[in-house]
Image (tube, rainbow, N blue to C red):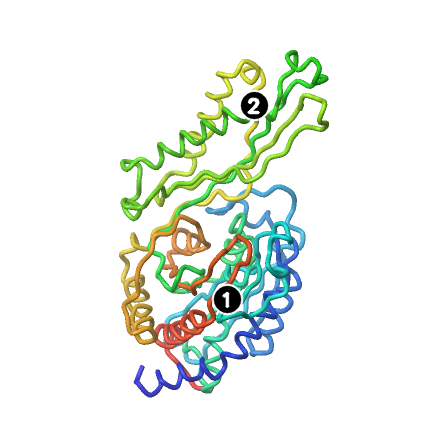
C-alpha cells in the first residue's frame, strides 16, 4: 500500500469515529445475554444490509454440529440462538479471503446495585465507554465493521471475499463460531478483536465446564447426625479439585507459552445451589466448575483426571462413598490453541501484515500475549486450518462491574484493522 492511500484510510477512520462510538453505544444498549441476543442480532443484520452485504441470519441447529470437532455439549435447547453473517463478495478476487469474527453474547450483569450506572445504559466518561459488553466484545464487532466502512468511505472494497460474523455462544460453548464453519464460511485467515490490550494473542488456554450433582440423606436438623449434608459434602470435593489445579500448574506440565506465567491454570467454582429448607439437612447440592487446560493437552484425558480426583475424594467420605457424585459435562469442552505453534506460510504472512499495520498506527512493535482465557480462535486454528489472529482494544472490568472500553484504543484498533484488511485482501474500486 502506498503512503498516500494509507494516510487517506487512517483519516477515513477518524472521519467516521463519532459514528463508530454512537454505533457502539447503541449496540451496547441491547442486553444480549444468553438467550436474549435477538434484538442485538437484528440490529447487526440491519447494519450489514444497509452496507450492501449479503446477510445470512439463521438459528443454530444442534444436530448439525454435535458431531463436529470442537462441539461443546449444552443443557436444554438452542431456541433463539441466532448467528448473523454479512458476506462481501469481491469482484476481482485477486486478494486473500478473510473472516472478521466477533461475538454478540455478553455475560450477566450481576447485582445492578453494584454498578455505578445501569449496565445497559451505556455512557462515555473521560474517554471510556461504559456498559456490559462494551469491551467484551462489542467494541471489537464495531471496529471490524467500521474498518470496512473506512474503505467504503474511499469508494474502495476488499479485493477478496470477506465474511463478517456476529456469533452467539462464545461465553459458554463457542458453538456459534462452530456453526459458521458448518455453514461453509471459510477463509484464508481470521481476525477476532477480543479486548486484550492491543496485543496479538500468541496462545490461549482451553476451558472445561462441568456440573457436579450430590445427593444427601435428609432429616430434621434436630437429628442431623443421622443424616448426610449434601452441601457440606462439596467441601472435600472442591479441595480435591484445587489439588488437581496445582498439579496442572507445575512447571513440567506447562505448554511453552506459559512457562513463565504465574498460575496459568485456574479453577473456578462459579455457582452452587442446594437444599430446600433451613431446618432440614439438605438432600441435594449441585455446583458448577470451570477449569482451564493448555494448548495440546488432551481434553478426554483431562476429563478423566477430573472424574478421578472427584471420585477418589468421594470414596474417602463416609457417606459419599455409598452415594457417589454424578458429573454432567456441559458448556465448554474447549481445547487450547497456540497461534505461535502455526509455522505455515499463511500464518507468517498474516502475522507480518498485522505487525506492519500496528506499527504504522502506533509507531511501535506489536507485542505478543499468552492469555489465560479462551476465545473462538480455536475453531479456525484447530479445525479449519485457518490462522486466527486475536487482536483487540483495551478494556477493563470485563465480566465485572463497570465494564468499560477505552475509545482511543478502539480508534487505533479500527485503524490497524483497516490497514490489515487492505493489505491482506487487497483493494478494488466500488
User: 48 above or below 121?
Assistant: below
Q: Earlier in the sequence, mark 2 or mark 1?
A: 1
Q: Residue at x 39, y 41 (%)?
A: 265
CA gap, disc 2 and disc 1: 43 Å
Q: Position of residue 94 (x, y in %)?
A: 37, 77
On screen, residue 268 versus residue 355, left or right, reads right
User: 323 above or below 93?
Assistant: above
Q: Nearer the viewer, residue 428 or 241?
A: 241
Q: Secondary structure at mark 1?
A: helix
Q: Position of residue 376 (x, y in %)?
A: 46, 54
Q: Position of residue 332 (x, y in %)?
A: 51, 44
User: 198 above or below 67?
Assistant: below
- Quadrant where the N terminus sits is bottom left
Q: Position of residue 35 (x, y in %)?
A: 65, 53
Q: Nearer the viewer, residue 147 or 52?
A: 147
Name the residue beneath numbered marker 1: 139
Q: Secondary structure at mark 2?
A: loop
Residue 254, by quadrant, is top left
Q: Residues within 10 Å of mark 1 (few under 14, many from 20)?
A: many
Residue 246, by quadrant, is top left
Q: Residues within 10 Å of mark 2 (few under 14, many from 20)?
A: many
Please state which of the two labelled residues, at mark 2 or mark 1, is closer to the viewer. 2
Q: Residue at x 64, y 53 (%)?
A: 113
Q: Residue at x 42, y 69 (%)?
A: 409
Q: Residue at x 29, y 48 (%)?
A: 257
User: 297 above or below 198?
Assistant: above
On screen, residue 382 versus residue 213, left or right, reads left
Name the residue beneath numbered marker 2: 233
Amino acid at each position: 500500500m502506498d503512503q498516500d492511500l494509507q494516510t487517506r484510510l487512517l483519516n477515513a477512520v477518524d472521519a467516521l469515529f463519532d459514528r463508530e462510538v454512537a454505533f457502539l453505544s447503541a449496540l451496547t444498549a441491547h442486553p444480549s445475554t444468553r438467550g436474549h441476543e435477538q434484538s442485538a442480532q437484528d440490529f447487526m443484520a440491519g447494519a450489514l444490509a444497509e452496507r450492501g452485504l449479503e446477510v445470512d441470519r439463521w438459528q443454530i441447529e444442534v444436530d448439525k454440529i454435535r458431531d463436529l470437532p470442537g462441539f461443546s455439549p449444552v443443557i436444554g435447547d438452542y431456541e433463539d440462538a441466532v448467528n448473523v453473517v454479512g458476506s462481501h463478495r469481491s469482484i476481482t478476487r485477486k486478494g486473500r479471503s478473510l473472516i472478521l469474527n466477533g461475538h454478540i453474547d455478553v455475560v450477566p450483569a450481576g447485582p445492578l446495585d453494584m454498578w455505578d450506572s445501569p449496565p445497559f445504559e451505556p455512557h462515555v466518561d473521560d474517554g471510556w465507554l461504559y456498559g456490559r459488553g462494551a469491551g467484551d466484545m462489542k467494541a471489537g464487532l464495531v471496529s471490524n465493521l467500521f474498518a470496512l466502512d473506512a474503505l467504503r468511505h474511499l469508494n474502495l472494497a476488499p479485493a477478496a471475499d470477506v465474511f463478517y460474523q456476529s456469533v452467539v455462544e462464545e461465553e459458554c460453548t463457542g458453538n456459534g463460531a462452530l456453526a459458521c464453519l458448518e455453514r461453509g464460511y471459510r477463509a484464508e485467515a481470521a481476525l477476532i478483536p477480543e479486548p486484550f490490550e492491543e496485543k496479538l494473542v500468541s496462545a490461549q488456554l482451553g476451558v472445561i465446564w462441568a456440573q457436579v450433582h450430590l445427593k444427601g440423606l435428609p432429616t430434621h436438623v434436630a437429628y442431623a447426625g443421622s443424616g448426610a449434608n449434601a452441601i457440606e459434602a462439596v467441601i472435600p470435593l472442591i479441595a480435591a479439585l484445587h489439588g488437581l489445579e496445582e498439579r496442572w500448574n507445575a512447571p513440567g506440565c506447562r505448554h511453552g507459552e506459559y512457562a513463565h506465567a504465574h498460575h496459568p491454570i485456574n479453577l473456578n467454582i462459579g455457582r452452587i445451589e442446594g437444599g430446600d429448607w433451613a431446618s432440614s439437612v439438605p438432600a441435594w447440592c449441585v455446583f458448577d466448575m470451570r477449569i482451564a487446560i493448555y494448548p495440546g493437552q488432551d481434553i478426554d484425558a483431562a476429563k478423566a483426571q477430573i472424574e478421578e480426583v472427584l471420585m477418589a475424594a468421594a470414596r474417602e467420605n463416609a457417606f459419599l462413598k455409598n452415594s457417589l457424585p454424578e458429573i454432567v459435562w456441559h458448556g465448554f469442552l474447549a481445547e487450547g490453541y497456540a497461534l505461535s505453534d502455526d509455522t505455515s506460510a499463511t500464518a507468517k504472512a498474516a502475522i507480518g501484515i498485522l505487525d506492519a499495520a500496528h506499527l504504522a498506527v502506533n509507531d511501535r512493535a506489536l507485542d505478543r500475549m499468552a492469555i489465560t482465557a479462551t476465545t473462538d480462535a480455536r475453531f479456525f486454528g484447530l479445525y479449519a486450518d485457518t490462522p486466527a489472529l486475536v487482536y483487540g482494544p483495551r478494556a477493563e472490568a470485563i465480566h465485572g462491574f463497570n465494564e468499560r472500553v477505552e475509545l482511543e484504543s478502539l480508534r487505533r484498533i479500527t485503524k490497524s484493522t483497516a490497514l490489515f484488511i487492505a493489505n491482506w485482501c487487497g483493494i478494488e474500486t466500488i
